[in-house]
Amino acid sequence: VVPNRRWRHAGLPSSRRFRRVVTHMQAMEQLTALLEQRAPPAFSKELLALRDALLARYNGAVDAMLFYGSNLRSGDALDGVVDLYLVVDDYRNAYQKSIPAMFNRLLPPNVYYIEVRSGEHLVRAKYAVISMPDLERGTSAKWFHSYLWGRFSQPCELLYVGGDDTATRVRGALVQALLTFLHRVLPVLPERLDSAAIWQQGLALSYQAELRAEKPQRAVHLYESWEDYYTKVTSLAMDVLPFNIKREQDASSLIYTISIPAHTRALARLGWFVRRFLGKLLSLLRLMKATFTCQGGIDYIAWKLERHTGASIEVTPKMRRHPLIYSWGLLWRLYRRKVFR
């Protein structure tokens, strides 16, 4: 990489632009390396049992498997339901049927439930299916809603990967999710803040763009669980983002002063307003889809709401047989009770 004539006409001296490009490249390499270093030396036998069962179920169509969520934080695969993402080469290859492939393509991802026996334990998992192209689009700035880049900006691990090229693409998508998240949230946050404020307030924005059962303190807990990780990736990402950013070390943390034009901030606030409205609609559509794709879907949804809120939820036989007909009254009552937001 060398300075060229085009850079001299870009408004910056070629040497200064050259240094900026080199800094950008180094930061991207360090972000990717940080994700590679996070891979654990071994997974539990329960997680490996889930991995093997899912690979067998999809008969060679799985390119990668991502492990994330509360079980990753706790390290206990038997605590509740494991959260997984299956990255497939093609929806039609994965399902061998046209209808689930069509729904997955129209509104990714499809969500399913699986139970696997590992020794004397029963391991439960909720897993989502997404294609590699949809993963790459959904974590990039081309994807408006935060559903994918909001999730994958958070820590996750590769439980399975089909090869080095696939690993490179998946880690590239994870880095892009992180950058997209910061690029979208920083313009609506205060000008001067530390990494804790960035992630706690940014994740709260992402949660508000969906129907979520988690309480507002959830974002604080997530940050505190991975504080060292978030501090490192934030520092590296600041060298890549297209904002004027200054750093200042105070007694306890690194403070960022981020200068963003007023019109950019106004557009960003409008964007998050639209995401909140659109996200509620998309969440309802995904819930409707999950009642068909997820075995015992209505019971799983009720269990998840009870787990996160402590509210008692009764699922009737009619709801199990015809969830799209008989569940709307329950959903409305739960929303009025603020069981989810």
Image (cartoon, rainbow, N blue to C red):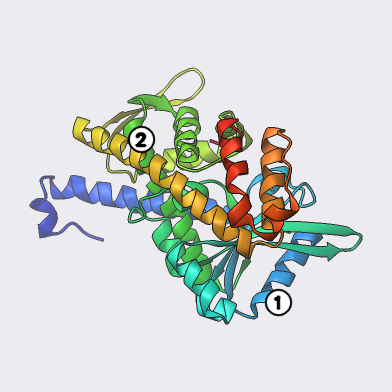
Q: Nearer the viewer, residue 317 or 137?
A: 317
Regarding residue 31, the answer to whether it shows in the image is no
Who's the residue at 39% across and 42% down the image?
Answer: 277
> N-terminal of the two: label 1 or label 2?
1
Label at residue 186: 2
| Residue 203, horizontal then vertical, whole percent | 49, 37
Q: Are marks 1 and 2 in contact (CB under 8 Å)?
A: no
Residue 256 in the image, given as x and y percentages of width and height: 37, 28
**Rendered image: mark on residue 268:** none
**Residue type, label 2:** Leu
Q: Is residue 251 visible?
A: yes
Q: Nearer the viewer, mark 1 or mark 2?
A: 1
Q: Which element is circle 1 on?
A: helix
Q: Is residue 87 left or right of residue 141?
A: right
Q: Which residue is mark 1?
A: 56
Percent of width and height locating residue 84: 63, 58
Residue 280 relative to residue 40: left or right: left
Mark 2 crowd level (few <14, some 14–19, many ≥20, 10 Å Cα): many
- Work out whether 246 lies above or below 178: above
